[in-house]
Image (spheres, grey):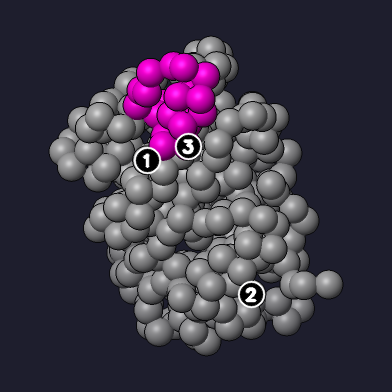
Amino acid sequence: MPVPTAQPTAQLSVNAPAIQWYPGHIAKAEKALHEALAKVDLVIEVRDARIPMATGHPHLQRWITGKQHLLVLNRRDMLPLAAQQAWSDWFRRQGQTVWWCDAKAGTGVKQLQQAAIRSGEALNARRAGRGMRPRPVRALMLGFPNVGKSALINRLVRQKVVESARRAGVTRSLRWVRLGQALDLLDAPGVLPSRLDDQQAALRLALCDDIGQAAYDNEAAALAFAQLLLLLETVPAAGVPAGLPQQRYGVAVGALPSGAPDLEGWLLAVAERHTGGDSLRMATKLLDDFRCGRLGTIALELPPPSP
């Protein structure tokens, strides 16, 4: 249910190419996905809690018409509590319950499992009313690349049954996993639109590592991220303390003659301090520090203000 948002926006440099990523395995998996949708009762949609809008597929509602739907916001540990509350309230106003999870630690997984099983009980009650025998609910785990679907399945099953890693594109085919006698889970590769028309959303996907690294330039993405940090300082719920770049890396962001922040100069200065002058290495370090939580809990998206 993507909607227009009043988010602070950062720009890639004018020389940076547009961010686009649609590898062949995703195109192939999407065809198989449409066939699988006819066989499932429930869709468990997983989004990245730091960017719930950017990781919402624009075609999902059309795909899952008539299916039960559970919305999971994973990586809750990487989001400030104020942002979690803001998103819970916003989705509630849209008529959507949110299931918050941290697949890495297992937080919220039991509650999600119980919600899926309750969906199965409702399904079997309808089947019994038609004289049919009960069966496990068939649930599809769906979402963008690298939002944590496979890690969530491993947590639900309590063992490593599907491959999981901190990069996009690990799962490349559909696979069924049995969870007790009540639930069958279908793990699917990450899906995303064939064209990313919203380049602000595409940038946020790149920053959160929810898209293949071949899609963007690390140095350009890091400069845009530094710009976004400065903008988010003015949004309390985002969780960015004032002067975070200087606090973390020991170099203040200077200003250009125009008054705009000198982000390229800042990146070069912190590269001299931390990576022997290698600005690409420093850019990669900055992105990794965010992705691994070393900069603290940060929300890159927040709900639009109420009218």
As helix, strand or loop, the secondary structure at mark 1 comes to: helix
Say which residue appears at 30% left-offset and 60% top-offset: 107
SS class, disc 3: helix
Give coordinates of residue 1: x percent, y percent.
69, 47
User: Between residues 300 and 135, which one lies in front from this camera angle?
Assistant: 135
Residue 123 visible? The answer is yes
For marks 1 and 2, the one nearer the N-term is 1
Q: CA distance from mark 1 to mark 3?
A: 9 Å
Residue 233: numbered disc: none
Please tell me which residue is depicted at 67% across the width and 55% down the height of the picture: 95
Q: Disc 3 marks which residue?
A: 122
The residue to which callout 1 is attached is 117
The span from disc 3 to disc 2 (Cα, nearest Å) is: 46 Å
For disc 2, the marked residue is 231
As drawn, 187 above or below 202: above
Residue type (three-letter) at the residue carrying disc 3:
Ala
Query: Around disc 2, counting alpha carbons within 10 Å, would you say few (fewer than 14), some (14 to 19), or many (20 or more)?
Result: some
Question: Which of label 1 and label 2 is nearer to you?
Answer: 1
Q: Residue at image x 49%, y 84%?
A: 241
Q: Kindly indicate whether the residue at mark 3 contacts the one at mark 1 (C-beta within 8 angstroms).
A: no
Pointer 3 local density, CA inside 10 Å: few below 14, some 14–19, many at least 20: few
Tell me the residue at 46%/17% (across/down).
131
**As displayed, is residue 212 above or below residue 111?**
above
Quarter in which the C terminus is drawn: bottom right
Residue 26 visible from this viewpoint: no
* Left or right of 8 on screen, residue 268: left
Q: Which residues are magenta?
A: 120-143
Question: What residue type is disc 1 on?
Answer: Ile
Is 125 magenta? The answer is: yes
Q: Nearer the viewer, mark 1 or mark 3?
A: 3
Q: CA distance from mark 1 to mark 2?
A: 42 Å
The residue type indicated by label 2 comes to Leu
